[in-house]
Image: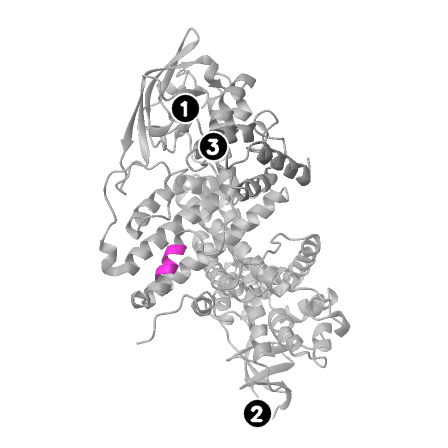
Amino acid sequence: MTAPAEVNLLPDDVELDLRASVRKVLEKHAPVEKLNAMYDGTDDVTAPLWSAFVELGLPGLLVSEDLGGAGASAREAAAVLEELGRAAAPSPFLTSSVVATTVLATLGDTEILPALASGEQTAALLVGAPVGLPADVLLVPDGDALYAVRGATCTPVTSLDMTRPLAEADLDGAERTLLSADARAAVDAGLLAGAGLLAAEQVGVARWALETTIAYLKERRQFGRVVGGFQALKHRLADLYSEVEQADAAARYAAATLAAGDPDAPVAVHVAASYCSEVAVHATEEAVQLHGGIGMTWEHPAHLHLKRAKADALLLGTAESHRAALAVLVDLPAPAAG
Amino acid sequence: MDESELQQRIEALLAEHPPATTDRLDFLHARFDAGLAWVHFPEGLGGLGLSRSMQPVVDKALHKAGAPDNDPQRIGIGLGMAAPTILAFGTDEQKQRYLRPLWCGEEVWCQLFSEPGAGSDLAGLATRAVLDGDTWTVNGQKVWTSSAHIADRAIIVVRTDPDQPKHAGLSYFMLDMHDPGVEVRPLRQITGEAEFNEVFLTDARIPDSDRLGEVGEGWKVANATLSSERVAIGGHAFPREFGMVMNVAKTWRERPELRTPETHERLMRGWVDTEVARITATRLRQKLAAGVPGPEGSAMKLSFAKINQELSGLEVDLLGDEGLRYGDWTMRRPTFVDFFGQDAGFRYLRAKGNSIEGGTSEVLRNVVAERILGLPTEHRVDKDIPWKDLPR
């Protein structure tokens, strides 16, 4: 078992500034009406939001400066994802700027990364189906090898969470270039970073649900009193607060160990991924329930976050699969089969 | 004083009182008088007015030199609760009289707060003290008192003015546990042990000079005691896989034949919960060090109670038929209880107390909801009524 890392778990000024900038563009470009419209087939969010991200230099956060990136770390990327989760906004940031970028950076790529860093192009790692959109370049594993595929036919699918557009990719006839014959470690690194930072997005989703529910319960009156004063609800919110704070700490630890390249990062990621994904689902389910009827309406944003939380819980490994991976790392093996 | 000056002071103590040839109590007295007992206390009271963070320097150096310690587990209530309260509210005479024997372990302290009729509602307590001349006469009953059977002194909250609303009529004293009006009886728990006691007070006498704070200020002083306890608890770092998960993980690794898919799922959830609590506690310490108040303390206690109960329950299930056995039901009166000690059945039963002692999980959820989340407070119908007029 690796030893816990000594890392700073508190945000610094750079992170706080970044977070504020990202929140501002999300408030401008991803209002609830436009997110709802994505479910009815109109996406007026992804492109303008991505342009705003490009202006802030976010697509290249994890790309080194000599390739046109910002040379920042997983800590800053986690701050961006937490805000994306809070807004339940669509963005190729996770798929392209975190997962695909980490794979390519680990391989030492210098051809594709500059285009990803500038935001001119996006990429996605094809693991299982469907794949996250938009993606100009697909990174396709084949055994130990990894190929860059351009010009694949991507057919959008109707997904549970339409704020993360997905597609079925047909690779027939697409141009395929070998990136590496031995890319397994790079793919694993990309998936590890993705799962660790998805935890930050899940914290953002959960924190939105907690804060929105508390604010509503402080206003909503029934039986002549504010319903947030009923102990049955207070206790549920107290438990939820405790879960969200702990999820936040776990996600920060994962981002900090990834940023430091600490040997404890895999343990930290599987802990954060399994814990935060369940907290996000629980928090959004509580938000729907505790809002009462309004929580079941199309108009109220609770459903956007519920769908995001439920889909996030499947995206880069289920909580159960992360616990299974963790069990191996911490020497608590599953019972022998049979 | 910097660290090298502190080191010099430690070396001087060790040179003048070599641990190998010095009587234990003489050494502890000398350590106290050198200001090396608790360095964050003032000079002349066992400290040097330094930061609490310097204490490990002293403790490590003295441990390395083979010096005796003051058996802190045995005098935990004195160190964690009585001492900070005496320091904050005591007169110079009280500080001089009580702190040295407290720290050296010559006088063991216990805490007399809870009563059969005042648990979560501590401010409703009914033990009465009446002043006659310069001595108070105390009558009533206290409960859940650890160490009462070995204690020499107690910190105690009593009602001195029943005409005031409940919070306003309390005062805080130091009681001589050897007074003939004090009777200590063991309180046997579900584990079979009597870790706690009931304390009956029948015309027990307390000189007014043993009062801490003003008459009627008892609630304020008691809150200072309770927050010192929380500082003492919250200040600990703990390693990975620590606490209740330790024993279960050990059993899991050593006994492959016990493993099942369901217990594996529960184990991994408990392991993750424990690790997440460790990370959260680490962040809380970093916040405190940076001067940012961390409100997670109450929430952390909720988590630990839940984790301890789930994992200790899992351990009994994991053991299968062996879980049907129990170590020993003999009534014992331990002076220190290790939540993680003894066998799985004991741990399971003892952990039930974790969501009750030091604030029930229900009260803590109210605290979190009201003080952190800003939700409406519970109706407090008894808050402005004279205590004597409350229905009971």
State which mark lies toward you, 1 or 3.
Answer: 3
Can residue A163 be seen here? Answer: no
Residue A223 inside the magenta-drawn segment: no
**Is residue B196 positioned above or below B311 on the image?**
above
Q: Chain of mark 1?
A: B
Q: CA distance from mark 3 to mark 2?
A: 84 Å
Can residue B67 be seen here? Answer: yes
Which residue is disc 3 drawn over? B24
Residue at the spot 38% in from the left edge and 34% down from the top edge = B120
Amino acid identity at mark 2: Asp
- Position of the C terminus of chain A, as image quadrant, is bottom left
Residue at the spot 37% in from the left edge and 48% down from the top edge = B340
Relative depth, front residue between A155 and B360: B360
Q: Are marks 2 and 1 in contact (CB under 8 Å)?
A: no
**Is residue B168 positioned above or below A327 on the image?**
above
Q: Which residues are magenta?
A: B246-251
Which residue is disc 1 drawn over? B153
Q: CA distance from mark 2 to mark 1?
A: 85 Å
* Relative horizontal placement of residue A171, taking residue B157 as reference (left or right): right
Residue B139: which quarter of the image?
top left
Which residue is disc 2 drawn over? A172
* Relative horizontal placement of residue A39, taking residue A337 as reference (left or right): right
Q: Chain of mark 3?
A: B
Amino acid identity at mark 1: Arg
Q: Which comes before the other along the chain, label 1 or label 3?
A: 3
SS state under label 1: strand
Extreme residue in the top direction:
B133
Residue at the spot 32% in from the left edge and 16% down from the top edge = B180
Residue B30: which quarter of the image?
top right
* Other-residue count near label 3 (Cα within 10 Å), few / some / many at <14 / 14–19 / ≥20: some
